[in-house]
Amino acid sequence: MKKGQETKIVILEAGLDMASQLGLECVSIGSLAKVIKMSKSGLFAHFQSKENLQVEILNYAGRLFSESVIVPSLKIKAGITRIKALVDSWINWSSALTGGCIFVSASTEYSDRPGKVRECLLRQQNDWIDCLDRIAQAAISSGDFRADVDCQQFAFDLYSLMLGFHLYFKLLDNSETKKRKEIALDRLLNNYR
């Protein structure tokens, strides 16, 4: 890996951590340059604008998310076992970030703000929802789900459960969150059998 690429990864890792803690909007060329002790002009040379920096952070987070959550889950046998592995991987991903899942916080920040950052986030979230839909289709094919399951409804229900977990775990710091997640997930999965 070339020095410029190594530097860019260091910048993106620090930017992801900052975005997880403070929100993506708080990540700017100047604020990130201070954190990594780099000149603003040096950091600017890598991204050319705050918006490009934020998009690159989202793309970097998306690659890490795919490597940490989606790819390992797809190695598990299709069906309920895969779904549970996917949820556990998502929880581990979300918990590993200092402030929680960047996609959850950025969704609130950019829900009604037009531009390249919102477009990137929207594409990523639609891809994630499509992934949940395909995992439900695989559960039907494996015989774990009924043949008449509405896979888009399942994707909605499962993602809603994960977002609820994120709120209870990160903001409310509820000690029973993991136990309640297991109960809710089992009920959800039983509804689709």
Image (cartoon, rainbow, N blue to C red):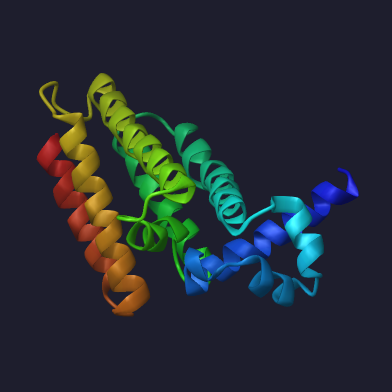
Which residue appears at 10% of the width and 41% of the height?
191
169 relative to 147 in the view: left or right:
right
Q: Residue furthest right?
A: 3
Residue 104, image quadrant? bottom left
Residue 136 as seen in the image, left or right of residue 70: left
Q: Where is residue 143 in the image (x, y as percent from the top left)?
A: 22, 23
In the picture, which quadrant includes the N terminus?
top right
- The image shows residue 14 at horizontal and vertical percentages of 66, 66
Residue 41, position as x, y percentages in the image: 79, 64
> Relative to 176, is 156 above or below?
above
Compare residues 111 and 179 and report the one nearer the observer: 111
The vertical placement of 64 against 77, above or below, is below
The structure residue drawn at horizontal position 27% and vertical position 28%, both measured from the top left corner, is 139
- Give 86 or 24, whichever is nearer the viewer: 24
Q: Residue at x 66, y 60 (%)?
A: 13
Residue 55: horizontal and vertical position, in percent? 55, 49
Name the foreground residue: 179 vs 6.
6
Q: Quadrant of the C terminus?
A: top left
Picture quarter containing residue 173?
bottom left
- Residue at image coords 19%, 38%: 154
